[in-house]
Amino acid sequence: MSIKSKLHDIKESFKGKTMAPAFNAFHTFLFTPNDVTSSGTHIKVADDLKRTMNTVIMSLVPCLIFGIFNAGYQHNFAIDAANGISTQASLFVNFLTFDNLMIGSMKVLPLVIVSYAVGLTVEFIFAVIKGHEVEEGYLVTGMLVPLIIPVDLPLWMLAVSVIFGVVIGKEVFGGTGMNILNPALTIRAFLFFAYPTWMSGDKVWVYDAVNRAGSPEAISGETILGSYAQNQDIIYSMSDMFFGFIPGSIGETSKLLIIFGALFLIFSKIGSWRIILSTLIGALVMGLIFNGVIEAGIITESSKFYGLMSVPFWEHLLIGSILFGAVFMATDPVTAAQTNKGKWIYGFLIGFISIMIRVFNPAYPEGVFLAILLMNVFAPTIDHFVIQSNVKMRLNRLKLKTA
Amino acid sequence: MSVDIVVSKGLDLRLVGAPSLQIEEAKFSKDFSIYPSDFHGIFPKLLIKENDSIKAGQALFFDKNSDRVKFVSPVSGKIKEIVRGDRRRVLEIKIEADKVISYKKIEKIKSEEPAHIIDFFLENGLWPFIKQRPYDVIADPNSNPKQIFISGFDSSPLAADFDFITKDEKESISKAISILSKLCNCPINISLRKESNSFLRELNDVIIHNVSGPHPSGNLSTIINKVSPINKGDIIWTLNLPDLSIIGKALLEGKFSAERIIALAGSSVSNPKYIKILIGSNISSFIKLKENNARIISGNVLTGVKLESSAHVRYYSNEITAIPEGNDYDLFGWAKPMFDKFSVSRALTFSWLFPNKKYDLNTNTNGEHRAFVVTGSFEEVFPLDIYPMQILKACMYKDLDEMEALGMYEVSPEDFALTEFICVSKQPHQDIIREGLDLMKKEIG
């Protein structure tokens, strides 16, 4: 008896039982089900939600692998720097090394595993309680979460915030497809407000920096944004920023790989190019406005805003996580605006507000996640006004007829 | 008069099993069936009993809500069985056919006054061929339409070529149109493919719309939305071109001739071609299948009705389609690259590489039912100036005001066939819209 028919028999025996969703989640992971169309169209396209989510995950994998190596690289780089050795990042000489891979895997993979294990457990429990199939939404969330947190975050904090994010961010609204806030960002927001010392500063971005703080072997790694916010000089070259050999959240440092991911998402028609493009435009416009303010001499070097305001407008896209947010966070179809016109407005405002928060909040300069969460809340309002114009068009037509 | 209409949004789905352009007379079916569920929204009240003898064109039942609307038998014979379901609702009327059909004589139309024409249609079973918008149901004979629309082609996959099946019906169809033009004081619109050489172009007093573009360019909603969008309170009557020949023959020959030329299509059919049959014929009299594990559909693959192996051609169907059933598992079907299935995305699905390939699709859902997640894809295949996902959601939470505001008066379930086909969440769009329309009809009227 083949594994296919064996599993089929088990599925039949589970039918109607409480644990059926749990078994089906594993079964449908192996085999797309033998369901046939019953009413409506007799044929369906090849894509299902699993394929859609899987496409997003595939576009994230390069960022994850880079993040693993970068975790190791930043650790060694910081130790060298503490010892007064300055090194130059080189992909094959000191980046793609076995040592970096080992250190990185040891730190990053547990975060990935905890994120998935805890999140999916919550999803399974809710699916069984509510008697519906396990929806695929968390597959992407579970991948995003480890990529947007500092490498040194304790695992238990991650577990607590994942539970909070999935329950409060998603399940209380009715599960996948019904949530208002992006679950991955809800998790990050919870971490940020509950454990702020673990989410910002110059220690958390490099493995072991927190541990060694105060000891003779202390190391540190300030992010570029942090340096700017404190009006310090930037020690990284433009190419380091672009390729990602810099400290930062695990998966969001390499702009090159994010751009690859974005192109893959746009090409496969899974990610909305409208949102990605308009977010970047919004960020550039805000950057330009600040550059103009500096140019006009309104803000001078004595101001605490000077550092980030004087960043050339295009450089904003290379620092921080605006690019990662635009490509992988803002495009979440459930929490974004759902009309095509609305997507332009939604994206533009995310970019615009991100840079604004970045400049005006030196204590915590990364504003992308707050901007996206804010616009998540306003997305239904944006859609409402877009749809109202369609409704008005119809009402005007009726008036014209009766007039 | 003729007008050009270009439809830009939509999707032409190419499938294996297009019928060859030859017409064959089917072996005469011994048993026939009429399904009242074909006439959406009516409540059948029977006029016959089991074992009654009936003639072709004799009324079988009428609609309880509109008792002038009668439904007639396509064939003469004996009522073999009346199958009933819950609360004794009539599901199927089985008729054992005579060897030679005897027709009920249809009286000549009294005068060409609208009221007399309507009576003629109602009395002789021709009225059910006139449907109305809003709600896409059989027209209310007391209503006053602002326009009449006739669909002169069907753009759905593997659909019957109306030009081909009506090529010998010029006389009857012209007669039907001339009567329809006197039925109400309103314009008659016919949609034709731009490249069509139909005889309809020679007719006077009709507006021909030359339509180009992908499916659903043949759906009347698409044309109506561009020509004369339906506002609240508007009524439009719609007809299907092949049905006009039945109306025309009733006028010319004085009998209800239920003859249709239908397409026999699909990858599971071993002999795809056109066949001449009577409405309600048993499909076993003409269909030959390549495989036993096949889905037989009365209608097309997007909007048709699933038939069992001993079933009958449905009342309005112009085609019978058979495709393989997809009741099998697929190992890692959600992750592996897909070459043999169709997709509008490029998520490791490669149908975008082969725009002219003909697909042999089966009935597998390719995934499970989920909540709506993906946005922005429906708009690509939906040509009306309506927000498809928002109107579907309004129907799901039954907000009548919102449904009305978003344009429910303009849509019919078939308009959502393509969005349903491409939906990654596998939601039943057509059922959702139909339930929404039913609710509106009940609450608003």
Image (cartoon, rainbow, N blue to C red):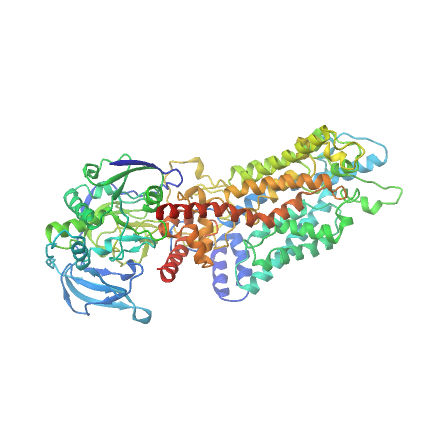
- Residue B324 seen in the current view: no
Q: Quadrant of residue A163?
A: bottom right
Residue B433 sits above or below residue A104 on the image = below
Which residue is situated farthest in the bottom direction here? B87
Residue A207 sits above or below residue B445 on the image = above
Which residue is situated farthest in the right direction here? A216
| Residue beneath the point at 84% across and 45% down | A212
How many labels sit on residues? 0
Q: Position of residue B406 (x, y in %)?
A: 43, 50
Viewer-nearest residue: A169 or A306? A306
| Residue beneath the point at 58% across and 38% down | A276
Q: Position of residue B358 (x, y in %)?
A: 36, 40
Decide if residue A310 is on the left or right side of residue B58.
Answer: right
- Residue B330 seen in the current view: yes
Decide if residue B137 is on the left or right side of residue B394.
Answer: left
Residue A214 sits above or below residue B94 on the image = above
Residue A364 sits above or below residue B75 on the image = above
Q: Position of residue B373 (x, y in %)?
A: 52, 50
Which residue is situated farthest in the top direction here? A295
Viewer-nearest residue: B361 or A167? A167
Viewer-nearest residue: B6 or A293? A293
Q: Quadrant of residue B354?
A: top left
Viewer-nearest residue: A343 or B419? A343
Decide if residue B248 is on the left or right side of residue A285.
Answer: left
Q: Position of residue A256 (x, y in %)?
A: 64, 33
